[in-house]
Image: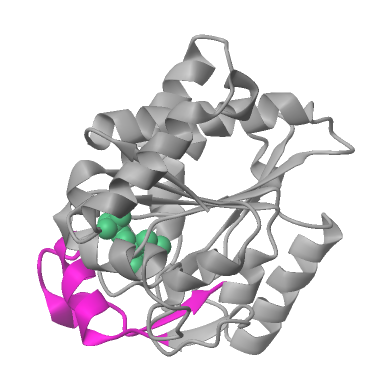
């Protein structure tokens, strides 16, 4: 695992955007061999999306040969619903870059057949072989995508019920009205995420410190879904100083030291 510790949110966003740009460019994607990117919502990735949009507008980065799969969607919300993840992604990212509409994949929260929708999503991903880079955030309870504590660590795309902690946290996007937050969602599984060649998780602010402690220093445990990153050959956590508040000073020093010693081609 790489643990990238930056001073603040903006530095995390820039590091993550540069990493995405580097990954896409070094892959040399073509229409036949596109770069497959897994994407997330939430407030944490917004700065990264803004940096990627800036790179695109400056002519430095194209998404013409990039295919995306988003992590999750609320059941019952359609693409025009401002709280839906469809709306979020188009409004905050897709509408500002050159990605062909047909390359964008999101789970359909309005489907009548959840099982079929989820199986179809898994098959679509398999059709591209695998996801090259899956980017996610993390909930304060350690969830990744909407895989709440207790989720199977080998789970696939399916329906999940949200915990009170997540409903409370996400109510800020619903005028702080918890009763408006859907209680069921469609989400890729933990197995779907960890099948990706690389997984990069963004975590900023001290609300994420407990989750980062369990991810880095805890044992692998389904009550802290993010801890599965310890089993992945290429996982990266990008966090700010505040998100390391519950790590031991030695742990922080260790990961900072490792990053400083990397040769330029490894960074
Ligand atoms: C939601 C999303 C997650 C995201 C989490 C954290 O629950 N389903 O994918 O990681 O929120 O969001 P934020 O970045 O706003 O803290």
Residue drawn at the location 79% of the way across and 26% of the way down:
28
The boundaries of the magenta stretch are 161-189
User: Where on the picture, by quarter, is residue 154?
Assistant: bottom right
Rendered-image quarter of ligand 1: bottom left
Q: Residue furthest right?
A: 32
* Residue 17 visible in the snapshot: yes
Q: Nearer the viewer, residue 150 or 169?
A: 150
Q: Please state the horizontal and vertical placement of residue 56, each as a whole percent of the image.
A: 53, 19
Q: Nearer the viewer, residue 76 or 185?
A: 185
Check if residue 230 falls in the magenta segment: no
* Residue 146 visible in the snapshot: no
Q: Nearer the viewer, residue 259 or 178?
A: 259
Q: Give the total number of marks visible in the rendering.
A: 0
Q: Residue furthest left?
A: 176
Q: Nearer the viewer, residue 199 or 2?
A: 2
Residue drawn at the location 17% of the way across and 61% of the way down:
207
User: Where on the picture, by quarter, is residue 164?
Assistant: bottom left
Q: Is residue 236 above or below residue 126?
A: above
Q: Please state the horizontal and vertical placement of residue 172, each as a whole percent of the image.
A: 15, 62
Residue drawn at the location 72% of the way across and 71% of the way down:
122
82 left or right, relative to 21: left
Q: Please state the horizontal and vertical placement of residue 156, each as a whole percent of the image.
A: 64, 80
Q: Is residue 199 above or below residue 143?
A: above
32 left or right, relative to 156: right
């Amino acid at each position: 695992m790489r643990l990238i510790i930056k001073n603040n949110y903006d530095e995390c966003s820039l590091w993550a955007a540069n990493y995405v740009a580097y990954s896409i460019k070094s892959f040399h994607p073509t229409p036949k061999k596109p770069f497959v990117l897994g994407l997330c919502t939430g407030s944490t990735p917004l700065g990264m999306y803004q940096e990627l949009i800036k790179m695109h507008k400056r002519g430095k980065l194209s998404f013409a040969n990039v295919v995306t799969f988003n992590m999750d969607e609320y059941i019952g919300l359609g693409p025009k619903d401002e709280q839906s993840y469809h709306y979020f992604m188009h409004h905050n990212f897709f509408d500002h870059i050159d990605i062909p509409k047909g390359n964008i994949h999101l789970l359909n929260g309005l489907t009548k057949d959840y099982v079929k929708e989820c199986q179809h999503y898994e098959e679509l991903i398999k059709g591209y072989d695998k996801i090259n880079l899956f980017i996610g955030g993390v909930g304060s309870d350690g969830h990744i995508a909407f895989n709440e504590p207790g989720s199977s660590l080998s789970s696939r795309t399916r329906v999940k019920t949200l915990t009170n902690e997540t409903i409370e946290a996400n109510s800020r996007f619903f005028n702080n009205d918890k009763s408006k937050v859907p209680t069921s969602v469609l989400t890729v599984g933990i197995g779907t995420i960890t099948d990706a060649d690389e997984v990069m998780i963004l975590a900023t602010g001290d609300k994420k410190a407990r989750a980062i402690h369990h991810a880095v220093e805890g044992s692998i445990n389904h009550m802290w879904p993010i801890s599965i990153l310890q089993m992945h050959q290429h996982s990266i956590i990008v966090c700010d100083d505040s998100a390391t508040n519950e790590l031991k000073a030695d742990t922080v020093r260790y990961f900072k030291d490792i990053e400083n010693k990397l040769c330029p081609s490894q960074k």
